[in-house]
């Protein structure tokens, strides 16, 4: 009888990085459970972890490089594929300049430390200003606000949920997401513990989400008005004499003056939140023994996303809850991204997009401009594209326009193991190994976790013969690109060449040794459940990266943005309009988990959610097929009546739309749904940083023909 083998690792399919216990028999996984000894996840796991074998064994998964031909896709050798990619990219750059090659990095890159360590070694050589990623889809407002307030884009305070007594959540659904820019596995149990010690969670959202259903209070809010509500909360704290900011916080007199007009009475008809509730929430938050305000995707993906995230930070700052146990704190990760300058401070508007003039941040342009940069002729027009683990046709605004744009590129290469709605346009696809076949250390998500821990995850299986890891693909592309580009060698080229030959675990071992805990990779390998580094600890003002080591509560750029937005923020939305918002699901993760049978089964979840009163007003019935139309497109799907939606608001899930031809996603195509981003408008963006306004898109809903 074959003896079972037990191995430990962590799931890297979402930000929760749950520790897992794998049982193998005869070379196959027969059981996956949460690792009860993991100090962060404490035995928790969600359905996504159970689907890890589905991804590895997926018959649709690409296992060899493929090249597009007139007769369809053909497998080619790694040598031929890598050489052709390097040659074609060099040709485009020589003919049209560096900016003619664009880059798009999808969310899974952040979950794979090989992509993080070696991707820049190749992509940096392209010297292009046309860099895009999933960051500009939904989180750039967080980074820009931290850059201006705290001096670094990655100084992102995390709610200390394990000790807080008042948790205010806006535009976030951690029950479904397991946290986002807040790594919080086992959220439900943490919430139960919070409530058990007498604490409360208040949720503000246009939908009664999975998180809102288990909250102590839920308040509907009209999409796009969160900034007005937050400024009203801050004003009420001032007016009630409850402000207690730290001594190192500057600019709050200017903030008080700037938010003076946002009285609860003026904000109530704008937001839909009654004035009495606004006053009570502000006072309860300010007087709680530790309170944390947290706003995520719903706040960042709206026209006033930067102002909304500023409002979140202001509420924590003004009440003295920044850098306070039970409030919001900075992490102290074993790999110190900020202290080691592994992520730059960030810079704003050093250049702007060629067509619309939207600003870069941190070397990246908002992806809302990518399609127009491909479609608009002239110097700097994008003619080639490199994508890695991304599906922007489904995950970025006005996906239909981007779909058409990609078809006209001179050359496109994708590092991906699926032939999806985006990679179907590629000339060559380079498939990397999947999660179970490579080791990992969660560089980013340990730095955003609600508790400081460190964990190394060895590969569960050896990679297939002739497979390549992401880091090997990027390293080899970099070497070939340097050789074909030629030119004078610099010290930077030498450093890149050396780094590209080191494995990710070797690079991370160096970072661990020089980090705050002086950990070794050997020690982590000997700790299969991870290492507990303790609860979050106060670190300010020492950790601030501003030149004067003070927190700047009122950056002039944000005061100017508020002045410009003030009339709109204080004006109620037009009556009778329907506003579209997205939604998350626990069994999904953007667009790339829809081909896993274990996650795709169950009741369909692609319907448009709509309040019964809105259905009745349009003569529609529950379950009817409807046509949803916006300025940029239209889709058809079934409608589901639910009082969980605020009247005047409808909701579609994100990441669906698997009905395009030329893909190889058998399971996903059987339940295609429709793409939310065939309705979102690339012209509706945050006026400060250019993030697309996914939340609050004006739509019409009518019976399908």
Image (spheres, helix red, strand yellow):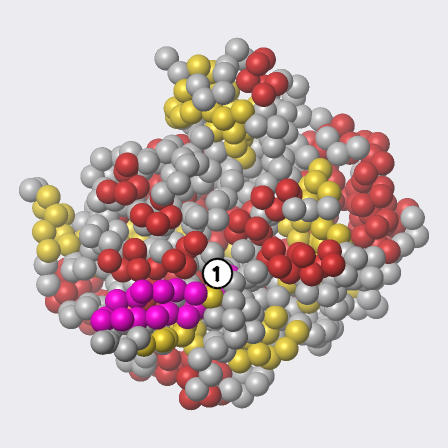
Q: Residue furthest left?
A: 71
> Is 332 placed above or below 690 here?
below
Q: Quadrant of residue 189?
A: bottom right
Give the residue at x 86% y 60%: 244
| Percent position of residue 408, x then y | 24, 39
Of residue 679 and residue 7, the one placed in the foreground of this image is 7
Numbered marks: total: 1
Of residue 148 and residue 424, the one placed in the foreground of this image is 424
Q: Is residue 434 magenta?
A: no
Assign the N terminus to one quadrant of the image.
Answer: bottom left
Kindly state the secondary structure of the residue where label 1 is placed: loop
Left or right: 497 as drawn, with respect to 257: left
Q: Is residue 19 magenta?
A: yes
Residue 518 visible here: yes
Q: Quadrant of residue 431?
A: bottom left
- Judging by the rendered image, the residue that carries numbered circle 1 is 45
* Bounds of the magenta segment: 16-33
């Amino acid at each position: 009888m074959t003896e079972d083998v037990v191995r430990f690792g962590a799931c890297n399919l979402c930000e929760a990085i749950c520790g897992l216990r794998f049982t193998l028999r005869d070379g196959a996984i027969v059981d996956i459970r949460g690792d009860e000894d993991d100090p962060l996840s404490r035995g928790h796991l969600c359905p996504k972890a159970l689907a890890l074998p589905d991804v590895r064994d997926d018959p649709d998964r690409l296992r060899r490089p493929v090249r597009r031909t007139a007769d369809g896709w053909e497998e080619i050798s790694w040598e031929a594929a890598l050489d052709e990619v390097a040659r074609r990219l060099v040709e485009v750059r020589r003919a049209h300049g560096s900016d003619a090659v664009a880059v798009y990095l999808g969310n899974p890159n952040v979950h794979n430390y090989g992509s993080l360590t070696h991707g820049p070694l190749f992509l940096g050589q392209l010297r292009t200003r046309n860099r895009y990623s999933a960051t500009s889809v939904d989180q750039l407002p967080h980074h820009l606000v931290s850059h201006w307030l705290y001096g670094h884009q990655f100084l992102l305070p995390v709610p200390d949920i394990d000790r807080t007594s008042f948790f205010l959540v806006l535009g976030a659904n951690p029950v479904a997401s397991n946290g986002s820019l807040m790594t919080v596995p086992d959220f439900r149990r943490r919430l139960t513990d919070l409530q058990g010690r007498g604490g409360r969670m208040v949720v503000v959202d246009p939908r009664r989400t999975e998180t809102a259903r288990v909250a102590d209070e839920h308040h509907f809010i009209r999409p796009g008005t969160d900034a007005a509500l937050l400024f009203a909360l801050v004003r009420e704290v001032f007016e009630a004499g409850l402000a207690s900011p730290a001594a190192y916080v500057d600019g709050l007199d200017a903030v008080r003056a700037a938010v003076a007009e946002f009285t609860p009475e003026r904000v109530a008809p704008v937001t839909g939140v009654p004035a009495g509730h606004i006053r009570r929430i502000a006072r309860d938050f300010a007087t709680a023994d530790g309170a944390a305000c947290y706003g995520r995707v719903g706040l960042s993906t709206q026209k006033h996303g930067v102002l909304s995230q500023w409002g979140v930070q202001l509420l924590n700052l003004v009440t003295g809850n920044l850098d306070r146990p039970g409030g919001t704190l900075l992490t102290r990760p074993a790999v110190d991204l900020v202290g080691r300058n592994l992520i730059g401070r960030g810079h704003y508007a050093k250049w702007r997009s060629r067509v619309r003039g939207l600003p870069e941040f941190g070397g990246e342009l908002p992806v809302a401009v990518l399609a127009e940069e491909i479609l608009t002729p002239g110097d700097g027009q994008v003619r080639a594209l490199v994508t890695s683990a991304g599906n922007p046709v489904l995950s970025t605004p006005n996906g239909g326009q981007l779909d058409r744009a990609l078809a006209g590129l001179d050359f496109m290469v994708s590092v991906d193991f699926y032939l999806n709605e985006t990679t179907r346009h590629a000339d060559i696809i380079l498939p990397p190994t999947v999660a179970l076949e490579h080791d990992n250390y969660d560089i980013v998500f340990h730095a955003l976790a609600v508790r400081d821990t460190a964990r190394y995850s060895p590969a569960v299986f050896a990679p297939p013969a002739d497979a390549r890891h992401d880091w090997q693909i990027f390293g080899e592309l970099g070497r070939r690109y340097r050789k074909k580009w030629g030119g004078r060698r610099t010290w930077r080229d030498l450093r890149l060449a050396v780094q590209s030959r080191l494995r990710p675990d070797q690079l991370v071992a160096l970072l661990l040794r020089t980090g705050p805990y002086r950990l070794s990779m050997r020690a982590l390998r000997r700790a299969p459940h991870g290492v507990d580094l303790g609860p979050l600890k106060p670190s300010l003002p020492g950790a601030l990266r501003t030149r004067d080591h003070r927190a700047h509560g009122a950056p002039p750029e944000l005061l100017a943005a508020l002045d410009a937005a003030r009339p709109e923020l204080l004006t109620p939305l037009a009556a009778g309009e329907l506003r579209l918002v997205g939604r998350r699901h626990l069994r999904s993760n953007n667009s790339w988990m829809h081909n896993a049978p274990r996650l795709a089964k169950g009741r369909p979840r692609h319907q448009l959610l709509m309040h019964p009163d809105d259905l009745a007003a349009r003569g529609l019935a529950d379950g009817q097929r409807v046509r949803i139309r916006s300025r940029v497109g239209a889709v058809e799907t079934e409608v589901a009546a639910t009082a969980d939606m605020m009247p005047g608001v409808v909701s579609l899930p994100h990441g669906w739309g698997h009905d395009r031809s030329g893909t190889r996603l058998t399971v996903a195509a059987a339940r295609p749904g429709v793409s939310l981003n065939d309705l979102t408008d690339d012209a509706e963006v945050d006026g400060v940083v250019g993030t697309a306004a996914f939340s609050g898109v004006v739509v019409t809903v009518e019976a399908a023909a």
